[in-house]
Image (cartoon, rainbow, N blue to C red):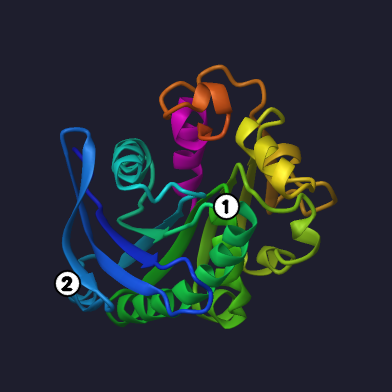
Amino acid sequence: MEKKVLHFFLRLSGISLEKPFSLESGQYVQSNGFLYKTESQKNHINGISEKLTSLSGKNIHVLIYIHGYLAENPWFASLSGYQLQKNIFENNNHDVNLVFSLQWDSGIHYNDNRKLAFQKGKSFAGYLSTINDILKQNHNKVQFSFLLHSMGNIVFQGLISEKKLMSETLTVNQIFLCAADVSSHIFDEEFSELVTYCRRIHIFFHRNDKTLRIANLFSPFHRLGIYGHEGHLPSDIVKNIDVTYMSDDDTAIGSRFSHHRYFYGSKNVRDYINAQLGKN
């Protein structure tokens, strides 16, 4: 039986830290190898809220996907989003039945965008809290998992800086950090509390990630997406996954050359993510 999930998007536009961000929200539908936005609304999530109240079933498993730097391009987001929907979001090996893509507009200056990504993450926190409240009113169990790519990990860093959201509000199942453009020591610092309220954390890294090595020219430091976590962590909670020597990264756009988008380009990585999402 073909699985279908509700897939919504929240997009924060604006690339100035001095001005308020603008919100666009709506739903995705898929057709002919692409995702298309429908019922788009500005500056509120009322339409999404109405659809959430009509969801059936006792349990809700929400997957939050946060893309990387410049991946908000409409054509790229539509094409890559279709691959994610087909191969991960609607996979039958897990019970994810609701997906939110958190989209954030970025500018051309790399270091400025690191700051922008963090602030947009903080801005997303209130919307996720509202969504969680709506779901909890109508369902016995609501849990969240996160699929994070590249600079999307900085957006997530901003999100969890709103500490009450993650530690007290959301029930967090799985977190997948893919090609993360954050410090390889971040679990000793900003992410140190994740192990206290998350069921399992998966760190994917590729030692020849060319995209992150280019980023290192603009802002040099050891990146999680190249080195994995460099330090001791409880092995039953956090797992380092070295994908340097995988040979099936061939379906994502440009991924076999950049070694940066394997989280949906490699069948082995997709199968792993889907299997872990099925563990509750």
Q: Residue at x 33, y 65 (%)?
A: 59
Q: Quadrant of the N terminus?
A: top left
In which image quadrant can residue 206 be found? top right
Task: Give left or right: position of 127 versus 231.
Answer: left
Tell which tag, 2 or 1, sits nearer the viewer: 1
The answer to whether residue 114 is magenta is no
In which image quadrant can residue 212 be found? top right
Q: Residue at x 57, y 28 (%)?
A: 258
Residue 183 vertical position relative to residue 253 in the rendered view, above or below = below
In percent of width and height, residue 78 lies at 29, 43
Q: Residue at x 73, y 41 (%)?
A: 217
Task: Give left or right: position of 273 versus 194.
Answer: left
In percent of width and height, residue 243 lies at 64, 29
The answer to whether residue 276 is magenta is yes
Measure how far apart labels 2 and 1 are at the Cα level. 34 Å
Q: Label 2, on which residue?
A: 54
Specify the segment rendered in magenta: 263-280
**Amino acid at dot 2:** Ser
Q: Are marks 2 and 1 in contact (CB under 8 Å)?
A: no
In percent of width and height, residue 52 lies at 23, 71
Task: Give left or right: position of 11 versus 197.
Answer: left
In percent of width and height, residue 51 lies at 18, 70
Residue 162 vertical position relative to residue 229 in the rendered view, above or below = below
Q: Label 1, on which residue?
A: 151
In which image quadrant can residue 259 be found? top right
**Amino acid at dot 1:** Met
**Of the pair 220 and 150, the residue shown nearer to us:** 220
Q: Residue at x 33, y 43 (%)?
A: 81
Task: Give left or right: position of 87 versus 200.
Answer: left
Q: Residues within 10 Å of mark 2 (few under 14, many from 20)?
A: few
Work out which residue is located at the far top of the displayed protein and give it. 247
